[in-house]
Amino acid sequence: MVEALKHTIGRLAALTLVGVSLFSHIAFADVKEVRFSSTDARDRIVFDLDKSDAYQAELAKDDTTLLLTLPKAKKGFRRLPIKGARISSATYQVKKDKLLVSLTLRPGMVYEAHTLENPARIFVDVRDRSEEKKKQKTIAKQPAPSAAQEVLPAGHAGTEDGAYIETPAAGLTKTSLAYWDDRGQISAWILRADKSKYRLELALAKGVVPGVEPVSKTAARTGATAAINASYFAGNGDLIGTTRIGGKTAGTTYFTRSAMGIMPDGSTVFGPISYDGKVTMNGVTLGVSAVDAERGENGVVLYNSNYGKLTRTNEYGMEYTVQGGHVTHIQAGNSRIPEDGVVVSVHGTAMDAYAGADVRVGDPVDIREDLGAAWEKVPTVIGVGPRLVENGRVHVTASEEQFPSDIRVGRAPRSAVGVTKDGDYIIAVVDGRQSHSVGLTLTAWAELLLKYGAYNAINLDGGGSSELVINGEVQNSPSDGHERSVGASVVLLRR
């Protein structure tokens, strides 16, 4: 009987709950940790177990209190405060042989409970009832698939222990990993996308620099099937790294770092990159300090349409609007940025130099931006690093690229983007700094990506920024305990 139930439940069991759901008892287990995330689609609570076990979920008569009876809590279990768009609070009662959790749902909510055997988890999704009804009506109106249409296969175990493989959409393969090394458990997610069905793009948070927003919001705004955090960024949202979007620079750095470029046909370029910019007006040539970033002392900063409508600078400098290779406007600060031009913003000694050259409206301007010959015709550049995999071998370049120790040394949550030898795309995250995943070193991260098909790959921003979203749902558990707002995301879009 138990074997029959286990066969019915399968590796991933999902059931919409109206009253009580009780899965067959498999083995005694402890709840190790509780995690919570909230997206536009749903609130999710995940209970990590050391083994699969039974649970009970029951909705009280008031329709707003969800009672969960779970296996006993492991020693040191932390009662995570929970508050989201659909769950207003959670209370915990730890007993000798059970953990009782009471969730207060906001009015009009429905829920589903799921189990996963490897890794062992119980998780609850809470959604708005009206949205669920809309979704069901939409599904009901859709015609039945024809024989020619592709039917997605169910998930299945991978060849490695702790690997579970799913197809979230046609052309996508997601591998969820849970395994142990000498330091503890590792949880990682690797998504592979067919290049003939998808394309990669770099998307700025809120569409401009500076801007910050969670990866899930960027994915929803751009209509992406999947998305992952991308660039390093400053607290105000300025991108740190040589970045280009739509053929226009969107960020720079003082260091030579690894980058990935995306060509119009979807092919990719990998290699080191550095930025060198110069502006010449009336015989005076000055180096560019930064692009689309806050103007500093004595600096020359270029602002283009990636920065939005205005430079948002103060009145203590001077700005030259340039269109068609000539100065079209001059003012002290907060200039309007033309779609077909740039604003050269100067301060201090740089301002004095151009003032001495008596630059006026109508004067010619020569702006040179050099990223290196290999990058000259690449419209999208994601400058991050270090390099992880180069032409099918592990090649970590953290030391030569002068990364600080918080990135270069030790285990951490990490994100990466890469391609297979055939050119299919790979985006991946590994959790860290949590009991369910201790994170990976850069070398171990590179080895894992190589094992799962990466032929070339670079590291993305990590730590609390590391997040993978597929079909609107956050796959991993960001180490901040919630989604962090980031400056840019790599998005996967259907062709």
Image (cartoon, rainbow, N blue to C red):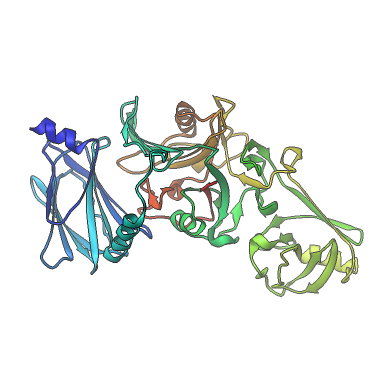
Q: Nearer the viewer, residue 84 or 74?
A: 84
Q: Which image quadrant is residue 211 in? A: bottom right
Q: In the displayed structure, would residue 348 be above or below residue 144?
A: below
Q: In the displayed structure, would residue 434 be above or below residue 26?
A: below
Q: Residue at x 18, y 43 (%)?
A: 74
Q: Residue at x 52, y 56 (%)?
A: 222
Q: In the figure, is residue 371 to the left or right of 102?
A: right
Image position, residue 52 (x, y; %): 18, 37
Image position, residue 443 (x, y; %): 49, 30
Can residue 217 be seen by looking at this rendering?
yes
Q: In the displayed structure, would residue 231 be above or below residue 25?
A: below
Q: Nearer the viewer, residue 294 or 8?
A: 8
Q: Residue at x 78, y 68 (%)?
A: 321
Q: Nearer the viewer, residue 381 or 291?
A: 381
Image position, residue 170 (x, y; %): 43, 40
Q: In the figure, is residue 56 to the left or right of 190?
A: left
